[in-house]
Image (cartoon, rainbow, N blue to C red):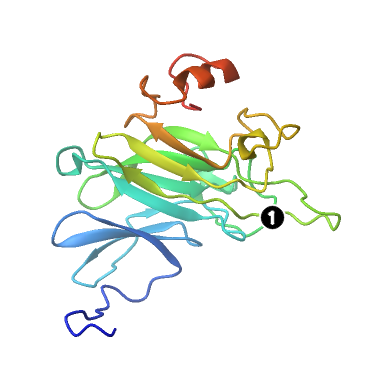
């Protein structure tokens, strides 16, 4: 630090590959860990025990990647997480259990955004908002799977809408302006920023709402 008015302070130690932080209030914050699938609620530097432990696939750039709190978090306790499921979980519809770094141990739509509710001691699952592509394609002649370009940023705008960022997943499809690439269907829906209502439905004032209708799906489908 070269500015005398700035300083660095350690807010928490003992974390494993922390990826994102969300401040709950002036006393504490939530922090996510990429490869463990754990969320910790940190107060006064104490990470304590995890308040949630998801079964993640953490190969390459996958894992527990993003977190955002609802603008009315103080009232509803809603916490949103972007994570890559392993498909190896033993409970909670496969959401909880073993983590893995196996390149192909995941479904095609493994990057997902789920809403949880903070009850003061733990995060309880509420609903899935969307499931998105996680690359399971062999992308070169060696047969290598690239588990990168997942992105994972979540943020609420001033309008109360949730923005979700997913990388291109090495798809090289029509959404990357490659005319003869994979179409913008569920599997090829990559390299985009999504704007969703807080329950995962699609705001009708989204700029490409009508274009999304042409892709297919029911009105309110969250691929737009």
Residue 190 x, y percent position in the rendering: 58, 39
One can see residue 216 in this view = no
Above or below residue 215? Residue 49 is below
Q: Measured along the vertical axis of the image, is residue 116 above or below residue 25?
A: above
Tell me if residue 37 can be seen: yes
Judging from the image, what secondary structure is the residue with disc 1 in?
Answer: loop
Which of the image's four quarters has the N terminus? bottom left
- Quadrant hosting residue 158: top left
Left or right of 33 on screen, residue 213: right
**Residue 140 pos. (x, y %):** 81, 54
Q: Is residue 203 above or below residue 162?
A: above
Q: Residue at x 61, y 61 (%)?
A: 60
Residue drawn 61% across the image and 35% down it:
175
In this view, 43 is above or below 72: below
Residue at 25 percent of width and 41 percent of height = 70
Q: Total of numbered circles in the picture? A: 1
Residue found farthest to the right: 141
State which quadrant residue 216 falls in: top right
Closer to the camera in the image, 47 or 84: 84
Position of residue 91 in the picture relative to residue 105 (left or right): left
Q: Residues within 10 Å of mark 1 (few under 14, many from 20)?
A: many
- x and y percentages locating residue 215 in the rendered image: 59, 20
Question: Which residue is identified by label 1?
Answer: 146
């Amino acid at each position: 630090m070269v500015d005398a008015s700035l300083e660095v302070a350690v807010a928490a130690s003992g974390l494993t590959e922390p990826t994102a932080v969300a401040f709950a209030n002036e006393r504490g914050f939530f922090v996510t860990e990429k490869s463990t699938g754990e969320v910790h609620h940190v107060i006064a530097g104490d990470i304590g025990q995890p308040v949630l432990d998801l079964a993640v696939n953490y190969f390459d750039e996958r894992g527990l990647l993003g977190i955002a709190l609802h603008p009315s978090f103080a009232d509803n306790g809603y916490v949103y997480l972007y994570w890559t499921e392993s498909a190896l979980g033993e409970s909670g519809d496969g959401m909880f259990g073993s983590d893995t770094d196996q390149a192909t141990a995941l479904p095609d739509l493994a990057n997902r955004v789920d809403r949880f509710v903070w009850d003061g001691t733990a995060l309880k699952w509420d609903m899935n908002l969307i499931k998105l592509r996680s690359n399971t394609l062999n992308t070169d002649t060696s047969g290598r799977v690239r588990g990168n370009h997942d992105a994972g940023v979540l943020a609420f705008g001033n309008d109360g809408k949730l923005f979700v960022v997913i990388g291109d997943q090495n798809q090289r499809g029509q959404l990357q302006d490659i005319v003869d690439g994979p179409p913008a269907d569920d599997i090829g829906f990559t390299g985009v920023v999504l704007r969703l209502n807080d329950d995962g439905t699609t705001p009708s004032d989204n700029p490409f709402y009508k274009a999304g209708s042409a892709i297919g799906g029911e009105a309110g489908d969250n691929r737009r």
